[in-house]
Amino acid sequence: MDGTVLVADDDRTIRTVLTQALTRAGCKVHATASLMTLMRWVEEGKGDLVISDVMMPDGNGLEALPRISQERPGLPVIVISAQNTIMTAIQAAEADAYDYLPKPFDLPDLMKRAARALELKRRAQVVPKAVEPPRPENSDLPLVGRTAAMQALYRLVARVMNADLPVMIMGESGTGKSLIARAIHDFSDRRTLPFVVAQAADLAGADGPSSLIARVKGGSLVFDEVGDYDDETQGRIVRMLDALPDAAPRVMATTQVDLAALMEAGKFRQDLFYRLGGVTLAVPALRERVEDIPLLTEHFLNRCERDGLGTRRFSNDAMALVRAYAWPGNVRQLENTVRRLVVTATEEEITRAEVEFVLGNQPAIEPLRAGGEGEKLSAAIARHLRRYFDLHGGNLPPPGLYDRILAEMEAPLIEISLDATGGNQARCADLLGINRNTLRKKITDLDIQVTRRRKLM
């Protein structure tokens, strides 16, 4: 790489790591913990690329993007943020950031993106516009996640929110499909126009489709659970879409069933399938992004506190059970469970017993209690894997199962080994049979929290 990179982050470790990596790659680096200093460098004409955190001690990196664009048109900015929500990704896109990465980020991935940005800058192809980030009335959506699947979804949402294409949002019940649709509308150019969610009954009668179009005007129209519509209703939608006026609304649809399979079985119209499937957004089930459960839980606890329900936290044992539970009702079930626990817990710290009581004797929790004494580790793993496959019914789990399962096993193995060795990383590495530097890297990569009993040495 060739060029000068301006790095702004209040975390000294991140500044050091980025400075070393970029310098080794051949770049000159100016690093600061101050947004004011970054803006002074930009105004002085320094830098071919900016890598900036969002929350800085003296300002907000996203809010500075329009100023950077005005001062230096064509200067690419990569935003990095620990605020792993869909709002951050969308606001970064609205403010015309070159790219957005959540923390903790993958350093090789960031270096590749930086190299592309510098090359585009050299070719003078990056021309950001000064666009003020939107300010929706409700930004408290539970669309939180640092997993790769959710971050990829957030980036796709940011790219399509103003595209003149229909959007199909697929996912199980409770995953947040309607929230995705709402976020696309609230952050789009249509956010001041109506947002209408249509049911099959809204299309009934001769005047149903025309009255629906009159209600939505040029806003956003969402067909809710379109896979449940009968053939007659599907035909009405096709004819309505074919006769849309010039000021046509943005069309979206949600479904928890595989429409392609329904179409192959002759239960969903092919013409409607292709009219609605301009862009497909797949929302993962909660069991497929277990690493996001603590983030979501904290989000819901904070919301309960703001709602006046009380201040609570989960004990380590309770959170371990929350992470291990299958959550067949997905994010919606998790939110309802957290709210109930906040109300019913007897102390500020929610215990494992209280979580077990609220979850009850649901089938998804039985395997957690069924492990008998003397059971071989391989048998216990096989039992949990069978349950994971069973949760998908007759369908196969998403691709990438091997790496996903290994990642799920690795984090608790390291956490338990650290606890067993009293936090001594040298002993833990010896117990695991890995190099101590490898252990340190895994603690960082897997975002394993170091408690008072587990101090980094």
Image: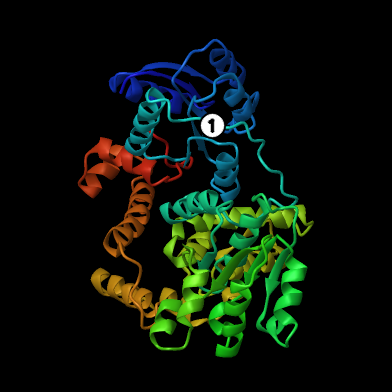
User: Along the horizontal axis of the image, is 212 left or right of 334?
Assistant: right
In the current view of this chain or complex, which residue is farthest to the left? Answer: 433
The C terminus: image quadrant: top left
Which residue is at the front of the view, 172 or 411? Answer: 172
**202 left or right of 262 in image:** right
**Secondary structure found at label 1:** loop
What amino acid type should be assigned to the residue bearing mark 1? Pro
**Quarter of the image holding residue 210?**
bottom right
Q: Is residue 311 left or right of residue 414?
A: right
Q: Is residue 334 visible?
A: no
From the viewer's perspective, is residue 127 above or below residue 186? above
Q: Nearer the viewer, residue 252 or 412?
A: 252
Percent coordinates x, y for residue 437 in the rendering: 27, 35
Q: Residue 420 at what x, y percent from top left?
A: 35, 50
Q: Is 5 above or below relative to 369?
A: above
Spot occupied by residue 119 in the image (x, y as percentages of width and height):
35, 27
What residue is pinned by disc 1? 128
Q: Nearer the viewer, residue 71 or 417?
A: 71
